[in-house]
Image (tube, helix red, strand yellow):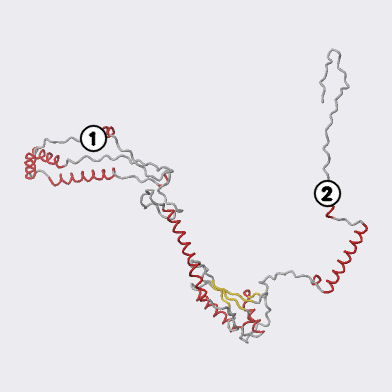
Amino acid sequence: MASGVQSMRLCLRAFRYAPAPRRIGRRIYVAKRAFSSAPVQWRPASKKDEADEPEEDEGYEEDDGIDTAEMERSLHAALNDPNINLHGTLRTQERMVGGAATILSNAQFTPKVALSRTFWHEDEDDPDLVTNERDEDEFDEDDIMGMAHGKLEEFREYREYARIAAWEMPLLSKLARPFEPPTAQEPLRFRYTSYMGEFHPAESKVVVEFSPRDLPLDEAQQLKLKKLLGPRYNPETDVAKMSCEQFEHQAQNKRYLGDLVENLIARAKDPSDMFEDIPLDTRHHAFKAKPKFPREWRMSEERRKFLDDTRQKSLLLDQKKEEAGILINGKEKIEQFFNRPEPEARIPQFIRAQSSRQLPGSRQQQLPRRF
């Protein structure tokens, strides 16, 4: 039994010898230089550094003393011995190798660094860039940057629209038609809104305007129609305005407004009830008082004659004052004010100061003169 176990141990020792695992050091993250577009380059290792590195397989000794013939004999003896559970031992060995593989894969895992922890945030996307420069080739100083290419593309688009405006839009004058005012059979005026190809929720809105006096109705029917319109009628301009934007397309909203106007006209022509006992309500509209030019200030022939006589009398009065020498000339007064001579500069005069108090004879001293 002991010889069989020893033979099995010798065989497993020969097969389980695996190469030394690779030493994986911690990854070093180096921040990019702030004002340089060149990539970071590592310094090549010198001979001294290569000599100082330890051998990776120093902890494992090579076993060169295994005899191949002895190993084969031991393996055959282990296979023929019924007391040895070879399959169980192999399964155990497989579990051990699988566990070692898991440990090696975890050791080779590269940790992920959060973008906010980097120094220059170089891994974050820049929303201001025209192009995405993360997946582009390394810049070799032989071309302009991606942002400059985006700017050139923008100028190309401007030039394209300039060419259209210069060469293609003048050709539209051939399709121009003269303006024809609407006839009596076209009393409705529709207004649409366009945002030049851009999507907008108010693009489907349609507005219709009409005047009740342009419709084929008499005075009583027009008054009834105004009462039916309610706040949609403007009594100051005598124009009714309605709008619709509940449908997706402009044609649908226009058709709805057309049917609504037809229904209003049909109700206004109904003679069963003309709403004669209901007055026209205009409280929804605020009338603004517009200032008017006074009638008294209007120019007439009498007013013009009166102004001419007044001016002639004023001229005669000025001539009499000028002859008498009492007329004041404003221009001369202004010139005299600005051209008057400047006053002479006064020279200050100094007076010697005299003291009225006499000092004692022993302490009397001659005071300095002040000038």
Q: Which dot marks residue 170?
A: none
Secondary structure type for disc 2: helix
- Give the residue drawn at x 83%, y 14%: 363
The amino acid type, in three-letter code, at marker 1 is Glu
Query: In which quadrant is the N terminus drawn?
Result: top left
Name the residue furthest right: 324
Q: Which residue is mark 1?
A: 55
The amino acid type, in three-letter code, at marker 2 is Phe
**In the foreground, 268 or 184:** 184
- Give the residue drawn at x 83%, y 36%: 346
Q: Tag 1: Cα neighbours inside 10 Å, few (<14), some, or many (≥20)?
A: few
Q: Which residue is mark 2?
A: 337
Residue 307 spot, x, y in % from top left: 84, 69
Give the image quarter of residue 45.
Answer: top left
Image position of 313 with respect to 43: above or below: below
Image position of 190 with respect to 347: above or below: below
Residue 310 spot, x, y in % from top left: 87, 67
Frontmost of labels 2 and 1 is 2
Residue 89 spot, x, y in % from top left: 15, 44
